[in-house]
Image (cartoon, helix red, strand yellow):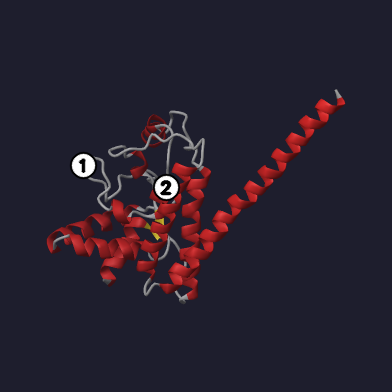
């Protein structure tokens, strides 16, 4: 009896040691990400370039989490599922400029001017986290329910995942439906929190404002400066 108990407790102790070691390695992933983001941003000529590099780095890490770690939360996210595209989006430094640069490259002048009118309307409605209305169709959402700037979408959009598209629709379109928030994949979400913090820090290092702005207002201002 004593020998069996000793064997079991020893095995549990070993598992505990390995769990603590893995937890430290897990935290090390984010420490490594922070250092990689700092280096990438320091090497970029502009914060717009830095934002694209930082988001790309986080995307690669997110893919690795999804494919390499077991028991990742299920996702019901898919093309055409656009409930989350009716929620306020704030962008850190560099992101609006990256989106504006993308738009200048892909849109004809008349289309760009029409977009500016839509951005002015959206920015005028207010789009911060505490603004009213809280839920508004994103200017960059197509009639087919797809993101027209998907390749350069903000960190907030990349961070959002859901295990239930139905829950998202209820939260956004039926405020009385009993869904107040959508649980997020902690590892995935944290990657883009790190990106936002790194961009804010990089802005301060360059003597620029580190404040986040509403998506429409930020892109409109960046287009005006382009």
In-front residue for pair 34/67: 67
- Total marks shown come to 2
Is the C-beta separation of discs 2 and 1 under 8 Å?
Answer: no
Q: Going 66% across and 43% down the picture, which residue do you hit?
A: 19
Task: Assign a secondary structure to mark 1.
Answer: loop
Q: Going 42% across and 51% down the picture, which residue do you hit?
A: 156
Q: Going 45% across and 73% down the picture, which residue do you hit?
A: 42
Q: Judge depth for marks 2 and 1 and give the one in front.
A: 2
In-front residue for pair 117/18: 18
Q: Position of residue 16 (x, y in %)?
A: 71, 40
Q: Quadrant of the C terminus?
A: bottom left
Mark identifier at residue 63: 2
Q: Is residue 49 above or below residue 179?
A: below
User: Label 1: which residue?
Assistant: 143
Q: Residues within 10 Å of mark 2 (few under 14, many from 20)?
A: few
Q: Residues within 10 Å of mark 1 (few under 14, many from 20)?
A: few
Q: Position of residue 24 (x, y in %)?
A: 64, 51
Q: Position of residue 27 (x, y in %)?
A: 60, 53
- Residue sitting at the far front: 3
Q: Is residue 31 above or below residue 136?
A: below
Task: Assign a secondary structure to mark 2.
Answer: helix
**Does residue 172 show up?**
yes
Q: Position of residue 172 (x, y in %)?
A: 38, 37
Spatial separation of the CA atoms under disc 2 and disc 1: 28 Å
60 relative position to 148: left or right: right
Q: Is residue 63 above or below residue 78?
A: below
Find residue 84 and report its image quarter: top left
Q: Going 32% across and 40% down the picture, which residue do you hit?
A: 82
Q: Quadrant of the N terminus?
A: top right
In-front residue for pair 208/25: 25
């Amino acid at each position: 009896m004593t020998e069996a108990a000793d064997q079991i407790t020893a095995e549990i102790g070993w598992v505990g040691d390995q769990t603590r070691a893995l937890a430290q390695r897990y935290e090390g992933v984010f420490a490594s990400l922070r250092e990689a983001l700092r280096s990438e941003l320091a090497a970029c000529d502009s914060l717009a370039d830095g934002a694209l590099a930082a988001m790309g780095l986080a995307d690669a890490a997110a893919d690795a989490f999804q494919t390499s770690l077991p028991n990742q939360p299920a996702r019901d996210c898919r093309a055409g599922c656009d409930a989350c595209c009716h929620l306020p989006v704030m962008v850190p430094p560099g992101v609006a400029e990256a989106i504006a640069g993308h738009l200048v490259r892909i849109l004809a002048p008349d289309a760009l001017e029409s977009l500016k009118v839509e951005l002015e309307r959206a920015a005028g409605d207010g789009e911060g986290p505490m603004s009213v209305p809280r839920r508004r169709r994103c200017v960059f959402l197509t009639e087919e329910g797809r993101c027209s700037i998907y390749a350069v979408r903000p960190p907030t959009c990349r961070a959002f995942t859901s295990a239930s598209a139905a829950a998202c629709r209820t939260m956004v379109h039926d405020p009385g439906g009993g869904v107040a928030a959508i649980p997020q994949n902690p590892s995935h979400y944290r990657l883009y929190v790190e990106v936002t913090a790194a961009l804010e820090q990089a802005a301060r290092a360059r003597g620029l404002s580190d404040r986040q702005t509403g998506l429409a207002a930020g892109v409109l201002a960046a287009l005006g400066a382009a």
